[in-house]
Image (cartoon, rainbow, N blue to C red):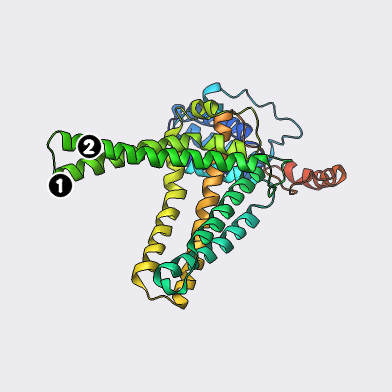
């Protein structure tokens, strides 16, 4: 069902997917898959048959309104291979999954971003000052300690807002320390492993008589290969780290490793599209602040910009890792929360339905055909 349909059908399906945002991810994908199969059959009959079918379906927003999950839709069962996204996804599909994750989260992600922007801006400026104006005597160890603590707390809060309904987002419980210890451990293993591999290849080069530029090139290539391998391993354990922070007990490191098998291409697309560009912008801003401009008011402005960029990097990573957790755990992404973190009163929901029902029952305008 993944074949590409003619352009009008693909545009219709993209618009329908967006209009079905009120459904959870598994229901939405089931509806789109069913309509895609119907349009594929009509496309095989010819262009006129496809055009007639699209006209009969009506505007995507009107069609989406028919799938009211509260009245029942009679949706077809979701094929196992489609419900668990081992399939290759486009960058746009991965981004839409992340956007659905953010819509289904409890309110509070903006606050987490604001905390990150504030702390990262201040610590950026102070750390740059320690390099550019060492005579001021900034205690860089304390600055970095505050920075790391803020980032860890923000990650825990983000994961809890996205993946847990009952856990207080900013609580300092056992899960906070478990997440921090696990993240520190796997990061240390990656760094130490990369260093040991590089040194091992350097020693092997010396033992074989390779010296100078050749030995240096071999060591650097080995270090890059090891860094890439450990980075891939880090991505595969991120769902487990998210589960620790959100207190999703029962999801183990092994579950994370097995659950990401076959999905790393989709994960890498998400990182390449949303996380990596922001991280590269962060690196560039640090280079400008430390090497290219004099220290002063411009540095403070750069610190604010870098704080926003770094906070965006963290939030994008949280949403992607939480989405991958849902993939690995076999959970659909819930429907959005139109009434915030608390459920709406039953009488309010019923009143809204009474007002919407006449609108949803209107027949879509029929296209006028030329004689």
**Are the residues tagged 1 and 2 within 8 Å (C-beta)?**
no
Q: Is residue 54 visible?
A: no
Q: Position of residue 158 (x, y in %)?
A: 62, 47
Say which label, 1 or 2, has the lower sequence index: 2
Direction left: furthest residue: 209
Viewed as shown, does residue 105 lie left or right of 305? right
Report the disc number at residue 193. none
Task: Give neighbour class at mark 2: few <14, some 14-19, many 20+ (Cα, 10 Å).
Answer: some
How many numbered marks does the figure carry? 2
The residue tagged 2 is 203
Q: Position of residue 259 (x, y in %)?
A: 52, 27
As drawn, 64 above or below 125: above
Q: Position of residue 211 (x, y in %)?
A: 13, 43
Element on which disc 1 rests: helix
Viewed as shown, does residue 203 lie left or right of 225? left
Separation of disc 1 and disc 2 at Cα?
A: 14 Å
Nearest to the observer: residue 230 or residue 280: 230
Q: Is residue 333 visible?
A: yes
Foreground tag (1 vs 2): 2
Nearest to the observer: residue 250 or residue 278: 250
Viewed as shown, does residue 11 lie left or right of 294? right
Residue located 70% across and 47% down the image: 171
As drawn, 159 above or below 30: below
Residue located 14% across and 46% down the image: 212
Element on which disc 2 rests: helix
The residue tagged 1 is 213
Say which quarter of the image contains residue 208: top left
Residue located 60% across and 43% down the image: 100
């Amino acid at each position: 069902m993944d074949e590409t349909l003619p352009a009008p059908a693909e545009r219709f399906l993209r618009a329908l997917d967006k209009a079905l945002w009120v459904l959870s991810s598994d229901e939405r994908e089931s509806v789109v898959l069913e309509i895609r199969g119907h349009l594929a059959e009509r496309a095989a009959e010819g262009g006129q048959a496809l055009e007639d079918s699209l006209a009969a379906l009506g505007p995507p927003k009107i069609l989406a309104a028919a799938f009211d999950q509260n009245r029942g839709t009679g949706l077809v069962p979701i094929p196992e291979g489609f419900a668990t996204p081992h399939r290759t996804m486009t960058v746009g599909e991965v981004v839409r999954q992340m956007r659905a994750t953010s819509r289904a989260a409890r309110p509070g992600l903006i606050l987490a971003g604001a905390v990150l922007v504030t702390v990262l801006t201040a610590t950026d400026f102070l750390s740059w000052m320690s390099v550019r104006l060492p005579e001021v005597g900034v205690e860089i160890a304390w600055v970095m300690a505050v920075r790391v603590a803020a980032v860890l707390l923000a990650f825990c809060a983000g994961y809890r807002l996205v993946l847990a309904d009952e856990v207080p987002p900013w609580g300092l419980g056992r899960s906070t320390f478990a997440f921090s210890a696990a993240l520190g451990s796997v990061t240390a293993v990656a760094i130490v492993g990369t260093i040991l591999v590089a040194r091992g290849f350097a020693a092997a080069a010396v033992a074989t008589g390779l010296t100078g530029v050749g030995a240096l090139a071999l060591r650097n290539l080995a270090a890059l290969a090891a860094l890439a391998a450990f980075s891939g391993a880090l991505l595969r354990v991120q769902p487990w780290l998210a589960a620790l922070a959100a207190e999703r007990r029962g999801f183990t490191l092994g579950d994370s490793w097995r659950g990401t098998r076959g999905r790393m291409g989709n994960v890498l697309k998400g990182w390449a599209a949303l996380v990596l560009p922001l991280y590269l912008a962060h690196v560039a801003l640090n280079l400008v602040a430390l090497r290219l401009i004099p220290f002063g008011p411009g540095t403070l402005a750069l610190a604010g910009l870098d704080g926003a960029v770094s906070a965006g990097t963290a939030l994008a990573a949280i949403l992607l890792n939480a989405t991958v957790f849902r993939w690995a755990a076999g959970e659909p992404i819930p429907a959005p929360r139109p009434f915030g973190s608390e459920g709406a009163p039953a009488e309010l929901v019923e009143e809204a339905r009474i007002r919407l029902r006449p609108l949803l029952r209107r027949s879509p305008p029929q296209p006028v055909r030329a004689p």
